[in-house]
Image (cartoon, coloured by chain):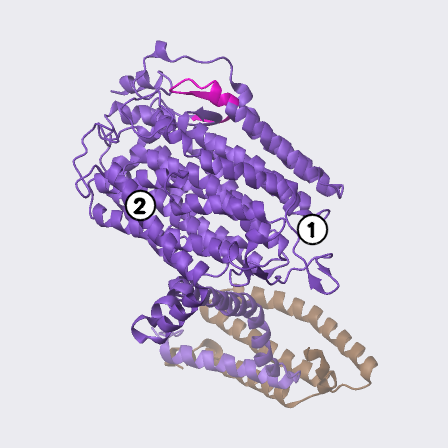
Chain colours: A brown, B purple
Amino acid sequence: MTVGMLAMAGGVSLAHALLLAGALFSIGIAGFLSRRNLIVMFLCTELMFQAVIIVMAAFGHWYWDFSGQVFIIFILTIAAAEAALALALVVLLHRRRATLDASAWRELRE
Amino acid sequence: MMQSIFAIQKSGIGVPAVPMEEVVIAADLSWAGLILLLPLISLVLCGVCAAMRVKSKAPAMITAAALAGSFVTSVALYLNYVPPGDVIPLLDWMNLSWGESRFDAFSANFALYIDSLSLLWIMFVTGLGTLITIYASEYMEPDLGKGYARFFAGVSVFLFAMGCLVLSDNLLMLYLGWEGVGFASYWLIGYYYQRPSAVAAAKKAFIVNRIGDLGLALAVYLIWVTFGTVQYDELMSVLQANDWRPEFEGWSVTAIPFLLMLAAFGKSAQLPLYVWLPDAMEGPTPVSALIHAATMVTAGIYLVARTYPLFLMEPVSLQVVAWVGGLTALLAATIGMAQFDIKRIMAYSTVSQLGYMFLGLGVLTTYGAAYHVFTHAFFKAVLFLTCGAIMHGFAGQLDLRKLSGLRHMKGWRITAWTMLIGCLCLAGFPFTSGYFSKDAILAEAFVTQGPGFEILGWIAIVTAGLTAYYTFRVWFRVCAGPVAFEPGDELHDGDAHHGEFHPHAPRFAINGVLLVIAIGALLAAVPYFLDNQADEHLAGGWIADMVHDSTAREGLPAGHGDVDGAHHATILGMDPHAAMYYISGVVGLIGLSFAAWLHLWRRSDADALSRWMRQRIWIGWLPRAMERKWYVDEIYHGVVRAPLWILGHMCHAFDRFIIDGLLVDGTARLPRTLARWLQPLQSGVVQSIALAMAGGVAIILLAMALFMQFDWPGGAH
């Protein structure tokens, strides 16, 4: 981290934003690796998603370039659709095995 | 230069510079094609007989009739023959041209080259073919309805191919015939295909001949490349235009005669390729008589005689021919002395006599070689056919220790006496045909200048003595002495009555043919005394006439072979030709008396002598080595067969383990093996996959941060 990255208008620097994103991503990956509940794992991936979005927004602001924010709009739209699909899958899987445990589907490895 | 060559080519095949108007072209001679056509027709008819399972002697009748037709046609052709001969075109085969020069064209047609040499050959080939077919009609009786038609179909194929070989007007058609007779020989040696030894012998003959055939193929190719033609008449014109000297300097002029020699030595069973002929005796005896004694094996002599000018261009080649011939004659004679199978003795004797013929060619007496071919064809056919008659009658017995006194047995007198005639001719007994033909070769060995030709002459004389010995060893053992016999192991129905074996004596067909050929063998001496028309200065009568007008005489040194020519050499103060009459006669009689002593009067002495020799260390190896054929087969096995066998198996192993195992199967097995290694990674536990992924990304990121230069945002500010 350089001094320039900390010196930003409004007291919120790039460094702050990146730290936040890093923290979010770490929480997400930690949760994903430690939990077996499908819904929680899915939520963790959403957390990692948000971390990436924050990085984009922060860099867009840093470079004074709007393409970062435009990307965020697109990504959020697609993420919404994907979230609907993923939750639908979770519902289907739950109906089959009456459990949300990811290890119940280990035979899918082959 | 080129124009002059073409001008000469146009003057027909009259090679000895015959002007156009002197060549008397006889009327349309295309009927001569019957010589080739009739055996082909008989082949087809024999095939039909085989398909219809004919149980009569029809195939033999058809073949005999067809071959007799061929023979009559040949004789008619001879009667219509006008020196220096003619080319009779039959069918177009290959006529290619891609330029102006004669090197830019290739022409080989089915055409008959009629000159004295080819006429001589085709007459005795078809004549003996006819007689031996009649003989075989009785000999092959036990196979009636089984292999009978197949046998005569093979004979027809042989006669067709031999006709192509002898009558062709170009080297390509000769090659066709050459391969054809090789195939027919394979067909007929392996006639008893249920017998493993016959199959092995057939394969051996075919494979050994292949080596020679390679030489012929290369020679034909080189002749075309060097001289621009494979047709005899054009070839001779080209050579004549250049005064019988090499037109083009270079290695090919040297290579051509040696390659032709290789071919001739393969087909005519000379060192080092003779080993197939003794084994070829596994075939039915008429085949041995026709193909492996009288006709096919003389094809090598014919080839050399036909391309003689090419040999004369490279004098070393003829010296090699002479030496190989002389040494083969001696070697085969020594082996023949120690064998017990009479057919095998005759086979080695054939190898030995063929050696004489090559010796004759090598010492520049094509007449002597051709005459010996002619006489040998008759007397060796008689000898083989009598062996066949004995084999037929005694259930396959060929061991001379188990047969005796044939001439006293009822029904066997003709066999015994015709065999005697054959033996006398082969032994060179004075005033028989073999005596005159062998002398012509022996004398010339002393006349012609060459490296060690005098030694070669004495080797040939010693061989003549050995020949007389082993020939009469057979006759005295088998035909003379007290009557005694044991049957062989090929008993047919009706051979044994009440548990006792009765030999069945030959009947009309075999006896008649034996008599005719035996008389022919005696009469073969007559041509020696007939006047020749072509050249009064030439010794040797009618046969010299037959050789004189052919390519076999072209390019010979002037005056060679003339009676009053430049004969400076003498033996014992006499002219070699005159001296040889006495020397070879005496040597032959010495051999004969030894045979008479050891195998007629005092047979016990032979056993005593054999025992005495075998017990002495200093000489004991000799009879053993001779009986084991000088271990030549064993040496070939060690030097050629075993290394090739090992090489073959190494190649097989390479193919099986490297090509098939490693490359083909290995490639297929690779993904499966890899998958088996990597499969445990697919645990199905989402967390572990994610951990691996996150870890991987972390490592990559760390590496990037450590080793790559980044322009960190704001770093520059």
Viewer-side residue, B457 vs B468: B468
Residue at 46% x, 52% y is B347
Q: Position of residue B205 (x, y in %)?
A: 49, 52
Residue at 51% x, 26% y is B74
Please say whether residue B671 is one of the residues in the magenta stretch.
no
Secondary element type, mark 1: helix
Q: Is residue B550 visible?
A: no
Residue at 82% x, 80% y is A96
Q: Is residue B600 visible?
A: yes
Determine whether, in the image, residue B3 is placed left or right of residue B625. Answer: left
Secondary element type, mark 2: helix
Q: Position of residue B191 (x, y in %)?
A: 61, 51
Residue bearing mark 2 = B584
Viewer-side residue, B688 vs B613: B613
- Indicate which disc, 2 or 1, sits on the residue closer to the N terminus: 1
Residue bearing mark 1 = B142
The chain letter under disc 2 is B
Residue B511 against residue B90 in the figure, above or below:
below
The magenta stretch is B76-96
From the viewer's perspective, is the residue at label 2 or at label 1 nearer?
A: 2
The chain letter under disc 1 is B
Mark 2: which amino acid?
A: Ser
Q: Position of residue A71 (x, y in %)?
A: 57, 65
Viewer-side residue, B270 vs A67: B270
